[in-house]
Image (cartoon, grey):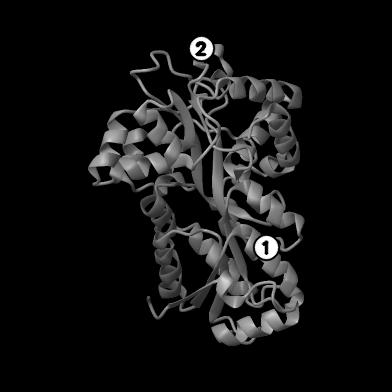
């Protein structure tokens, strides 16, 4: 591990076993946290679990001289921890995936608004919180996959997944999965709750199997013929495309990708994002870090490290992503995914989407 980067997991500090004051004190001692007035150190709580993110952190240190400390955990663990730590929290920045999760975090009032000309210029307005509480730095697209041996006329839109011709063919993750909650939230935004619920009921009727596994499992199900059609985030497929494993290449050869809704509003996109925390002891360093994430250098790390699309279009530097192209994308502000999330879950529950 680079000397520029110190990492711990949330679990190793026994979250919930000590009081908030003791927790904050113990964390500061473990990480050798600098005094609140010092700006040569930055404490990041990250729910992104990609080794390639180390390049983001070390790149920031090399560019600024500010040393980075990382606490890793699930978004739920980290948000709970920040709330418990309160005003004594050493955390400066929270990074997580999906606008729905950022919305949940914002409901706990843990972020502070950030005003930055750099961020406002570089980050599209629909990929950031309207009041600057968080910003999206990479996008992931919910794509459709199909087996051409089973499906001659594949769905071209998310709405098509409800068509009876796909009965017993559709595979998709559970309704509690945040990616699906955000997709449903977008459908509510575009069509209204009643029509969105009709869609959910019809898709359930088309299930090839009960929801199970992660996004890659849905793609593998299409390749094996267990499913005819599936929905998964694009970067899971791009990992298979870039893999040297023969089995992964067989999956790719047996499936086709569809960018949905290209003749309409565009494909559903979501984000990885970050915000400066309300009690950040190193606010200036935290803002500098967010601005660094919007640089061409950092944007290229997102694209090459996890095959996500950079939010700064000209920063795309990934041959596979360039080969598949940048599809037309839904321009709705991603903050609505969180606002519509409670209703989305209720619709899924009533539809019997397990």
Q: Is residue 74 visible?
A: yes
Rendered residue at 50%/45% (across/down): 139
| Within-10-Å neighbours for mark 2: few <14, some 14–19, many 20+ | some
Rendered residue at 42%/43% (across/down): 235
| Within-10-Å neighbours for mark 1: few <14, some 14–19, many 20+ | many
Image x and y of residue 253, in percent: 28, 30
Looking at the rendered image, the quarter that the C terminus falls into is top right
**Image depth: mark 1 or mark 2 in front:** 2
Q: Is residue 37 visible?
A: no
Q: Dot 2: what SS?
A: helix
Q: How many marks?
A: 2
Image x and y of residue 117, in percent: 60, 58
Image x and y of residue 108, in percent: 76, 59
Can you identify the residue that label 2 sits on? 165
Rendered residue at 65%/40% (across/down): 333
Can you identify the residue that label 1 sits on? 79
**The image quarter in which residue 77 lies:** bottom right
Give the camera-side residue of 100 and 217.
Answer: 217
Q: Is 256 on the left or on the right of 206, as rendered?
A: left
As displayed, is residue 299 above or below residue 36?
above
Image x and y of residue 49, in percent: 48, 59
Q: Is 129 on the left or on the right of 267, as rendered?
A: right
**The image quarter in which residue 276 lies:** bottom right
Q: Is 115 on the left or on the right of 342, as rendered?
A: left
Rendered residue at 41%/27% (across/down): 226
Give the camera-side residue of 294 and 79.
Answer: 79
- Between discs 1 and 2, the one toward the N terminus: 1
């Amino acid at each position: 591990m680079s000397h520029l980067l110190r990492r711990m997991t949330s679990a190793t500090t026994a979250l919930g076993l000590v009081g908030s004051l003791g927790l904050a004190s113990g964390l500061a001692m473990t990480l050798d946290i600098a005094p609140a007035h010092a700006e040569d150190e930055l404490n990041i709580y990250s729910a992104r679990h990609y080794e390639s993110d180390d390049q983001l952190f070390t790149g920031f240190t090399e560019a600024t001289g500010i040393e980075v400390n990382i606490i890793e955990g699930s978004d739920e663990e980290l948000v709970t921890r920040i709330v418990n730590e309160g005003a004594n929290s050493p955390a400066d920045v929270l990074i997580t995936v999906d606008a729905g999760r950022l919305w949940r975090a914002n409901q706990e009032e843990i972020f502070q608004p950030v005003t930055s000309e750099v961020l406002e210029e570089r980050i599209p307005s629909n990929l950031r919180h309207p009041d600057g509480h968080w910003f999206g730095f990479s996008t992931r697209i919910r794509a459709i996959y199909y087996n051409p041996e089973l499906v001659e006329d594949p769905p071209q839109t998310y709405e098509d997944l409800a068509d009876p011709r796909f009965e017993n063919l559709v595979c998709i993750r559970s309704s509690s999965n945040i990616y699906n909650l955000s997709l449903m939230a977008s459908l509510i935004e575009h069509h209204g709750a009643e029509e969105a619920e009709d869609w959910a009921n019809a898709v359930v009727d088309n299930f090839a199997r009960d929801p199970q596994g992660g996004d890659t499992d849905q793609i593998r199900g299409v390749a094996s013929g267990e499913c005819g059609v599936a929905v998964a985030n694009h970067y899971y497929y791009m990992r298979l495309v870039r893999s040297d494993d023969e089995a992964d290449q067989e999956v790719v050869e047996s499936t086709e990708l569809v960018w949905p809704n290209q003749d309409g509003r565009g494909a559903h996109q979501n984000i990885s994002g970050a915000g400066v925390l309300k009690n950040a002891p190193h606010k200036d360093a935290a803002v500098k870090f967010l601005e660094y994430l919007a640089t061409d250098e950092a944007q290229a790390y997102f694209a090459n490290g996890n095959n996500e699309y950079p939010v700064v279009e000209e920063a795309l530097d990934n041959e596979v992503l360039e080969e598949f192209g940048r599809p037309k994308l839904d321009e709705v502000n991603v903050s609505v995914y969180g606002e519509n999330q409670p209703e989305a879950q209720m619709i899924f529950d009533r539809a019997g989407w397990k």
